[in-house]
Image (cartoon, coloured by chain):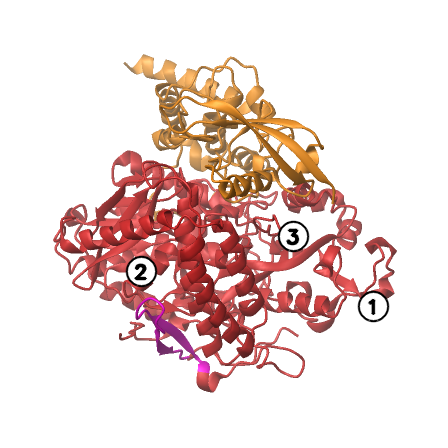
Amino acid sequence: MQLDSKIPSGPIEKKWDNRRFELKLVNPANKRKYKVLVVGTGLAGGSAAATLGELGYQVEAFTFHDSPRRAHSIAAQGGINAAKNYKGDGDSVFRLFYDTVKGGDFRAREANVYRLAQVSVNIIDQCVAQGVPFAREYGGYLDNRSFGGAQVSRTFYARGQTGQQLLIGCYQALERQVKAGTVKMRTRKEMLDVVVVDGEAKGIITRDLVTGQIERHYGDAVVLATGGYGNVFYLSTNAMNCNVTAAFRAYRRGAAFANPCYTQIHPTCIPVSGDYQSKLTLMSESLRNDGRIWVPKKAGDKRAASDIPESERDYYLERKYPSFGNLSPRDIASRAAKEVCDEGRGVGPGGLGVYLDFADSIRRLGEDTIRARYGNLFQMYEKITGENPYRVPMRIYPAVHYTMGGLWVDYNLMTTIPGLYAIGEANFSDHGANRLGASALMQGLADGYFVLPYTIGDYLATQKPGAVGVDHAAFAEAENEVRARTERLLSVNGSRTVDSFHRELGKLIWDHCGMARTADGLRDALQKIPALREEFYGDVRVPGSGAALNQELEKAGRVADFMEFGELMCLDALTREESAGGHFRSEHQTEDGEAQRDDENYCHVAAWEYTGYGQKPNEHREPLVFENVKLAVRSYK
Amino acid sequence: MQDMRLKLHIWRQAGPEAQGALRTYEVTANEHMSFLEMLDVLNQDLIEKGEEPVAFEHDCREGICGTCNMVIDGRPHGPQKGTTACQLHMRAFKDGDEIHVEPWRATAFPIIKDLVVDRAPFDRIIASGGFVSVNTGAAQDANEIPVPKADADDAFSYAACIGCGACVAACKNASAMLFTAAKFAHLEKLPQGRVESERRALAMVEQHDAEGFGACTNQYECEAVCPKEISVTSIAMLNKAYRSAVLKTRETV
């Protein structure tokens, strides 16, 4: 396997222009002859499918949901970054680029990040034209707020429902193409394999979730926009159905998987309340604009928050990171919360929580202003916890939220399988070892609206449309493998539920590959995961049949892939002997407990190549070169 | 933490053509669980006993994706105002309660299995005209068109619809006018959307009727159960625009 990042030549601000000029074009009359399969209809997949449809390609878009409006992009609360500099506070494309590279702890590819910052401004224009109701000021112009890791206000938002509004905009654009006949929408179909013909991606195998039919679909190119793998932890802020299956199936077919150990633990989530818990709920980072994070100074202080005087409170983020304070990047804020809880200063039942307190802001701005800014978030918090955050501080704790790792892609967003593209959270490219707040929506839409629609033409122009049919032997082989896997899961008929295995796997990964990782812990996990996987295949119980709607079967297939994927994650974490962003190896920290990178030996992307079930994968390294941002110790002090 | 013993009467139906019935189950829950977590507990029990778990749809479990849909004690999404089923917590119930759980019932939403229904008609209503016709890349600078804050806020409040279908389930006519009008009103409140207003009103209402949803007779059960509390003034806006568009088209014929 050769990793060729295909970074364009020229100075950084010219690279994307140069590439757009170099890319081969498909003439408008020929576009309709090419079929592109887009898997996933969140912000990345939905925007790509809509735009490819507008350009005139034949698009088939797949989602396992009942509608393309349901993808988890919808749950993003806080906002979307763009280098508009509408505030005149010193923002620029270069500053957004710089902040993102630094926020990612210098483990992202410079050229990709610069392009992301460049097209960020077009995204806002596009969304406003679609009718996305962003927040506005009284003058009628767009409003901005601040987010972690930045000292400018560049985040556009629609109350606490920015992801929803952007996704609805993109969904409407997609449905418009469905009506126009350029996009065929395939709902309730789950992709279970990629079909590779002579080394190139030429289709997918899906299971119809209602009828159970295993189906073959041909495409001249395949785009995976299937999101992240945070649910490997079982408990995360991801929606219940988020999974790694599509990306993992692609990995098994030869697509390299990059940096799987880079996972983001979000500092502000509602703490776990019991064993039955099915998921965790995020409280938007935007709350840190007006909320102050603190714990008691004394360990084991059981007094109510209101009984603890100011002098006995430790506003630890403001103390440790005075220039960024409560708006320190996510990885730093999460680790700081873990630290104070490990010292016994955590609050709430079990001591796994810290306060996010709005009392000062309510005094300063009034309750109405706070309600206007965060009303729905406060309401959501109260529904879950039964506590009123206007009166008592919120209790929060870090939880798994986003995965920076993903399928390795070159500058054109193509994986190591020609014809197979990965966009949005499913790829690895833009966030390095830590993603900044409000950058996920930006990346999903950048890839889908403004990058992939250009770059995919370069590949298609070299292809003869419809060259291979679904009767090709590779389709039959992939279909048979999918059938065999499904039947295997149904035939075990053991004693344990799929959820019980998923929970056990999640706990293993959280304990050993969570907020802090050690070589011993990771080795332990690498022993235990294969054993758990064997137990899964020997004792899982999947009721019902494969010939109808069977939600347990769907879950079983996803958990089976997590069982293999979790091992890859731990291997990557063990191999990366440094701390960077969300990957914190306890062995590698500075005296004051900050992440310590090793730029000499680990300034690279680790891309893993599948070598067989239970076999150790091969590691390939793409060196990262920093020509425009100086490699430095990340400081937010 | 106090245990709650509950008796559940849940609609079970093996497939679209099968005969369905309410079946009774017992489950032990506690007040911190969400309603769906309580159903998870029941399902784990059923699987361990060798029975088929109850099929129900859910995804984000934080009230925004619109996937979950069930009628709880006769009310879509259950007893709490402005709350989806996934956000409903068991503290809304007490030990010894009997709870009825049923699917959305509407001709246009056929049952697939147990509590799962087919809501594809909603996508087709959006496809008929619930969008602004702008291709990617054709947009001008976002601040070129100032939008009064009040209009932007109004547009947002209609755009907050999550497409769950509770409005249809609550309506005696199984009308989807609140869903249809919420989208119409969102776009109508913005200069970007107003350009296609007439065409949109005609197309969306026609598609709504073609899907087999009933007519709106202004009873407002939809607004009462809407988890996003979308106002029925949107229906008045759509009706007005529709009437005027129909008259205009007749004149030109």
Give the SS element for disc 3: loop
Mark 3 burial class by Cα count in 10 Å: few <14, some 14-19, many 20+:
many
Q: Amino acid at mark 2?
A: Ala
Q: Is residue A618 magenta?
A: yes
Residue linked to disc 1? A298
Mark 1 burial class by Cα count in 10 Å: few <14, some 14-19, many 20+:
some
Q: Amino acid at mark 1?
A: Lys
What is the spatial separation of the Cα atoms under label 2 and label 3, in whole angstroms?
Answer: 34 Å
Q: Is residue A321 left or right of residue B147?
A: right
Q: Is residue B196 above or below residue B171?
A: below
Give the SS element for disc 2: helix
Tell me the subunit letter for badge 2: A
In depth, the one of B178 and A275 nearer the eye is A275
Residue linked to disc 3? A270
What is the spatial separation of the Cα atoms under label 2 and label 1, in whole angstroms?
Answer: 51 Å
- Which residues make up the magenta segment? A602-625
Q: Going 28% across and 52% down the picture, which residue do you hit?
A: A484
Residue linked to disc 2? A250
Q: Which chain is red?
A: A
- Circle nearer the N terminus (2, 1): 2
Residue A338 quadrant: bottom right
